[in-house]
Amino acid sequence: MSKIIQLKEVTKKYNDAEVVSNVTMGIEKGRIYGFLGPNGAGKTTIMKMILNLVKPTMGCIEVFGDTIKNNSYTYLKRIGSIVEYPVFYDKLTAIGNLKFHCEYMGVYDEKKIEEVLDLVDLNGMEDKIVSEFSLGMKQRLGIARAMITNPELLILDEPINGLDPLGIKAMRELFLKLRKDYGTTLLISSHIITEIEQIADEIGVIDKGKLIKEVSMEQVRHDAVQYLDIQVDDIKMAAVILDTRLKINNYKLISDSEIRIYQDNITQNEVSRELILGGVNVYGMDSKSDTLEEYFLNIVNGGHK
Amino acid sequence: MMKLMKLELQKFNILRYWIAFAVINVSIIGLAVVTGTVADTEDAFGTAAQLLDFGDIMIRVTFIIFAGVLIAKVIIGEYKNSTMGLMFTYPIPRKKIMASKLAVVFLFTFFATILANLIFGFGMVLLNQSFHLIPDMIMIRDIVSRVPSMIFNGFACAGLGLISLFFGMRKYSISATIVSSIIVAILLNSSSGVEMNTLFSITVIPVIFCIGGIIIAYLSFANINKADIK
C-alpha cells in the first residue's frame, strides 16, 4: 500500500528545546491513523510540519509522494485540516467562513456547503456569527470546513474536543464513513485513548517528542496482555513450581499470597493441577486481559508495570 | 491576484472604511475653516497655496496612519487571531497572500489620498466664499494645477504607509504597527519654518519614499516561506 504521509527522521527544535525527536512514521492511503499522546507530546507540531506551517530542523517529510520544501503549497489543495483548535473569522457567519474557505481552496459548490453543515448537524446555524458559537459548534464547523472540498487527506487535531457524547458518536461515524465511502485517509490526534481505539486502523503513540510505538489496532488487540492471577497459601513453593515444572518465567509476585502470570499459552487447569500436585493450596484463580487503555498507558510509561 | 484582493476586500469589509474616510474629510475641512476664521489678528492662510498645502499635509499624515491601521487589521490582526495559519494552509504561495493584502492597503491609501485632496480643494473653493479663509478667491484652476502633485503624493503616502508592516511583523503587534505609522507620518510631514516646506515638497522625494516603502514592506516578509507559523 502506498504511503500518503511519510516522515523520515524528523526533528524539530525551538531554540534548544527539542519538541519532536527523530520521528519516522508512515500513514497508508485509506487508513485512519490515530495519533495518541499526552498534551505537549508533539502531536500538533508534527501536524503543522505536515502542513508546512512549521519547518523541520532535520529530516524530511513526504506527502502524496513528494518531499515538502519551504515553498511547497500545491499539495495543500488535497488536504483538509484542523490544527490546534478551529480558527475562524469570528465576525463572519458560519456560511461566510465556509464560502471564503472554498474560494481560497479553489473549489466552489454551493450545494456542498449545505451538505456538510447537515453532516455535522449545524443546519439552521448558517447565518449565525461564529463568535457566538460554542466550542463544540466551532469544532463541528471546523470539521465541516475541513471536509467541504472532499480532500484525500484529513488532518484533524483533537477533533472531538468540546463535543458532547452524541456529537462524539456522530463524528466517529462520520470519520468511518469518509474512509469507507471516499477512501479518505485520516490523521486524527487525541489524548483520549478510548476514542482513538474505536476508529483507528493504525496507532502512533508519541510522548515527549518521540514516537514510542507505531502499531496496527489488530496487533494491539492481539497484544493486549492477558494474565492469570492465582491466590495460594505458599507463595515461595508456588514460584518454584512455576519455574521448574511449568517453565513459566514471566510472572510477578503481587502480594504475599498472589502471583500474576503473563503468559497466555497456559491453561488454568494445567497451573492448578501442577500447584496442587506440588502441595500448594490454590484459593482462587482469575484470568484477565488488559484494557486497551492500560495497554497504552504501559507503552507511554515505558512498559513498566 | 485580483481574486485574492477581492476576497480581502470582502473578508474585511474594507469598503466600510469609506465611512471613516468621509469623517476624516469633514474633520480636515472643519479644521481648516476653524483655523482660517478664528485667527482674527492676522490671516492664518495668506494664499490659496498655503491653505491647500495645509490640507495636503493633514491628509498625508492621516492616510499614512490610516494605512498603518489597515495593515494592523488585514495582516497583523490575522496573525493575532491565528487566521494567518489558516490562510497558509491554502494552496496559495504565502508571498502572494501578503502581496495581495499589501496591494489592497496600497491602492486604498493611494485613491483615498487623491480623492481627499480633491474634496478638500473643492470644499475650500466653496467655503472660502462664505468664510473668507484667505483674502483672495480660490480658483478651480488652483486645484486642477495641483493634480499631478496629488498623484505623486498619493503614491508616496501609499508606499510610506506600508513601512509600518516592518515594525508590526516583528512581534505581530497591532500597537507597534500603528505607532510606527504615526512616527513615519509625522517625521516626513513636519514642516521646517513657515513656508510648509516638508520633505514632500521636492518632487523626486515622494517617488523615492514610495519605492522605499514598498521595499521595506517586502523585506518584512521576504523570509516568510522559511518561517514557522505559531
Image (cartoon, grey):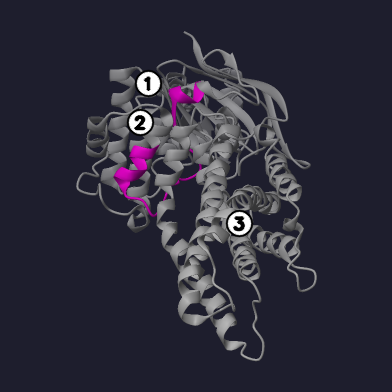
Q: Is residue B144 left or right of residue B149?
A: left
Cβ–Cβ under 8 Å for marks 2 and 3: no
Residue hosting label 3 = B68
Residue placed at 57% from the left, 32% from the top?
B96
Callout 2 secondary element: helix
Residue A5 seen from this side: yes
Could you give the CA–CA distance between mark 2 and mark 3, rounded to whole angstroms?
A: 36 Å
Q: Is residue A182 left or right of residue B105?
A: left
Q: Is residue B57 left or right of residue B188?
A: left
Residue placed at 48% from the left, 37% from the top?
A294
Q: Residue A202: x percent and y percent?
A: 46, 23
Residue hosting label 1 = A184
Residue hosting label 2 = A147
The one nearer the camera, A268 or A147, is: A147
Could you give the CA–CA distance between mark 2 and mark 1, rounded to whole angstroms?
A: 10 Å
Q: Residue furthest top?
A: A1
